[in-house]
Image (cartoon, rainbow, N blue to C red):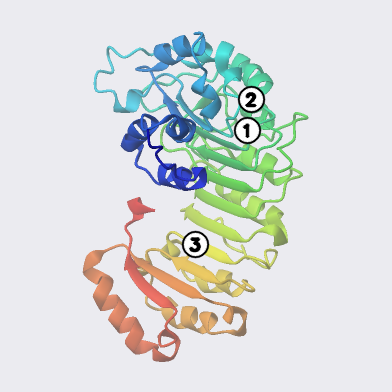
């Protein structure tokens, strides 16, 4: 019987790596050699909700081969994905994490952990007993943590959770709420964290979005991060003054100092708390995005003037800026501080004004725009 030539394993791995998720199950059935790579790819991400939790727990406690070793990214809807469940009245709203915790240590290769509380539809609090169990099972291994739409009883509960992962390098905190916050929906001073926990020392990437109308701000949490031993090089800060987060966010940028290389910044700030803010303490900042440049008013030019060597600059909502700002903006972008510019992106929030604004500005400042590093594009506020 003639033998069939086999493809090199590194080649089959590349085929599987670039296969669509629906094709991976078929790849696993091609031959025995393709099975391990297909399973690693197929089970590298696992989303657990009320529909599959019982089945996954049953699998973890069975005697069948444990594919949980392949999971690198674990996403858990703490009370089920109520947000997308059209039958919310009949959905299972009991917490799923207690069902998983006795077996979660079987996920031996998880590096990325995400918790989604769907708070807008089910406002339940984080259970502090979960923190210790997670720290024991996964604490030393997690380097990326995302916590979204969760309510914590008080600030130390959130601090305890984040500090439970000493190897953390990426943290995403979206729309969190502190039930016993020292303020609610006003920019008054908040009580600081007074415990002994410190942020993970390797934490260098933070993505933070202030709470919407469903939650309070986390200014003291940001201040805790700013005072920690870690050195942030990437910050994504979507800050809301009504939640009391703007001042703490500015402190966080200052604390990053010359380590900061990339910054996305959005101020929903009717009190102009950014006045006097500058980037002189961030001389190595290379990439800067301001979602709504119009929010900064005439201070935009002054703030940009404090930059040293930025290479990529993106300004959103430029069609909403006062036209009187443009001369100063062009002057600062042509100053010696901006000789390092590689690309400037001006985002217009209205399709109607895109072509007209671009042509007018190009015609008015031909020397700057003739350099070919500037792009006008459409991006509405909800698309950021």
Q: Is the C-beta separation of discs 3 and 2 under 8 Å?
A: no
Q: Position of residue 209 (x, y in %)?
A: 49, 43
Give neighbour class at mark 2: few <14, some 14-19, many 20+ (Cα, 10 Å): many
Residue matched to label 3:
289
User: Circles 1 and 2: CB distance less than 8 Å?
Assistant: yes
Look at mark 2 in the image and give the residue it sits on.
Answer: 138
- Residue name at image x 48 percent, y 61 percent: 290
Residue nearer the viewer, 302 or 97? 97
Question: CA gap, disc 1 to disc 2?
Answer: 6 Å
On the rendered structure, is 221 left or right of 93? right
Residue under the image location 46 percent in, 13 percent down: 59
Q: Residue furthest bottom?
A: 367
| Mark 1 or mark 3: whose residue is earlier in sequence | 1
Is residue 106 shown to the viewer in this render? yes
**Residue assigned mark 1:** 142
Image position of 350 with respect to 373: above or below = above
Q: Earlier in the sequence, mark 3 or mark 2?
A: 2
Q: Is residue 65 above or below residue 273?
A: above
């Amino acid at each position: 019987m003639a033998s069939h030539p086999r493809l090199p394993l590194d080649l089959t791995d590349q085929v599987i790596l670039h296969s669509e998720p629906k094709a991976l199950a078929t790849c696993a059935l091609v031959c025995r050699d393709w099975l391990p790579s297909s399973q690693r790819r197929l089970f590298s991400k696992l989303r657990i909700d009320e529909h599959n939790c019982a089945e996954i727990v049953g699998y973890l406690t069975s005697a069948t081969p444990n594919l949980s070793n392949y999971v690198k990214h674990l996403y858990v809807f703490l009370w089920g994905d109520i947000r997308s469940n059209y039958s919310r009245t009949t959905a299972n709203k009991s917490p799923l994490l207690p069902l998983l915790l006795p077996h979660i240590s079987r996920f031996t290769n998880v590096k990325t952990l995400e918790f989604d509380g769907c708070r807008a539809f089910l406002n339940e609090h984080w259970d502090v007993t979960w923190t210790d169990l997670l720290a024991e099972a996964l604490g030393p291994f997690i380097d990326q943590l995302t916590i979204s739409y969760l309510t914590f009883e008080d600030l130390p509960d959130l601090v305890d959770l984040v500090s439970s992962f000493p190897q953390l390098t990426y943290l995403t905190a979206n729309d969190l709420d502190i039930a016993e916050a020292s303020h609610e929906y006003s920019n008054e001073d908040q009580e600081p964290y007074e415990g002994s926990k410190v942020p993970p020392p390797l934490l260098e990437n933070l993505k933070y979005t202030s709470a919407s109308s469903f939650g309070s701000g986390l200014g003291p949490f940001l201040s805790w991060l700013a005072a920690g031993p870690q050195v942030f090089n990437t910050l994504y800060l979507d800050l809301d003054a009504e939640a009391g987060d703007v001042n703490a966010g500015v402190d966080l940028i200052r604390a990053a100092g010359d380590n900061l290389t990339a910054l996305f910044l959005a101020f929903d700030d009717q009190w102009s708390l950014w006045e006097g803010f500058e980037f002189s303490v961030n001389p190595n900042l290379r990439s800067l995005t301001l979602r709504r440049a119009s929010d900064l008013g005439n201070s935009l030019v002054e703030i940009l003037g404090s930059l040293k060597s930025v290479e990529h600059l993106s300004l959103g909502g430029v069609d909403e800026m006062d036209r009187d700002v443009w001369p100063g903006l062009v002057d600062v972008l042509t100053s010696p501080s901006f000789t390092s510019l590689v690309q400037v992106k001006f985002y217009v929030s209205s399709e109607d004004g895109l072509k007209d604004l671009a042509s007018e500005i190009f015609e008015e400042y031909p020397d700057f725009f003739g350099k070919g590093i500037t792009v006008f594009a459409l991006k509405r506020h909800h698309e950021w």
